[in-house]
Image (cartoon, rainbow, N blue to C red):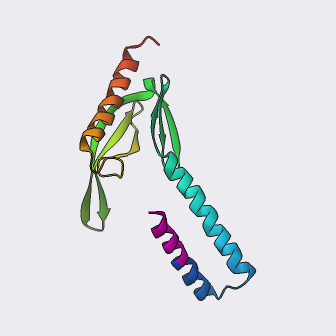
Amino acid sequence: MIGWELVALAILGSATENLFRLAGTAFLALAIGFGVVWVVGAFRIMRMGVYVSGYGVRVRGLFRTQTLAWQDVEHIRLHQASHRLGRFEIPSGMTVLIERRDGGHVQTPLWAQGIDFHRRPGLFRSVYQDLRDRHALARLAPA
């Protein structure tokens, strides 16, 4: 996986170098910039997920982290996600969606076809059920 990413970065760097005719310090700055973006992105991807505690649920995405107290969560449900491409709608599989009491929702990175669950559908259902159980337990607890 890392090899493919490094090859893609090398191709992007080479194309950028040729397009803008970069040399010396400019090319070094480009390489360092690509490296920093790659490391920061890899770190954020590594930390992506849904984290639960007695207080609530924290959803870490690639660009944003949201923390919701259990009392702010109305419902946790499965959602059939899809993407639109012009007039076409492309189904992308089941994800976990958190509905907030204020009517909004939070999309989680829990995706049935994702790398964590692709070949283990039972694990996806188990994680989803555990999240629902913790929400139900928190709703029963005195405030």
Tell whether 99 sits left or right of 66.
Answer: left
Q: Position of residue 121 (x, y in %)?
A: 25, 44
Magenta span includes 64: no
Q: Position of residue 78 (x, y in %)?
A: 28, 40
The image quarter containing residue 132 is: top left
In the foreground, 14 or 78:
14
Q: Is residue 63 visible?
A: no
Instruction: Pinpoint residue 142: horizontal percent, then vertical percent.
Output: 44, 10
Residue 131 position within the rendered picture, expressed as x and y whole percent measured from the top left: 36, 31
Q: Which range of residues does the magenta coloring cover?
A: 1-10
Establish if 41 lies above or below 106.
below
**Dominant secondary structure, magenta:** helix
Q: State whether residue 91 is above or below residue 20.
A: above
Residue drawn 24% across the image and 65% down it: 88
In which quadrant of the rendered image does the N terminus lie? bottom left
For residue 134, side relative to residue 67 (left or right): left
Residue with the most extreme top position = 142
Q: Is residue 8 magenta?
A: yes
Residue depicted at 71% across the width and 79% down the height: 26
Give me the residue at 58% from left, 78% from top: 13
Task: Judge whether 129 appears above or below 142 on screen.
Answer: below
Could you say which quadrant of the image residue 31 lies in? bottom right
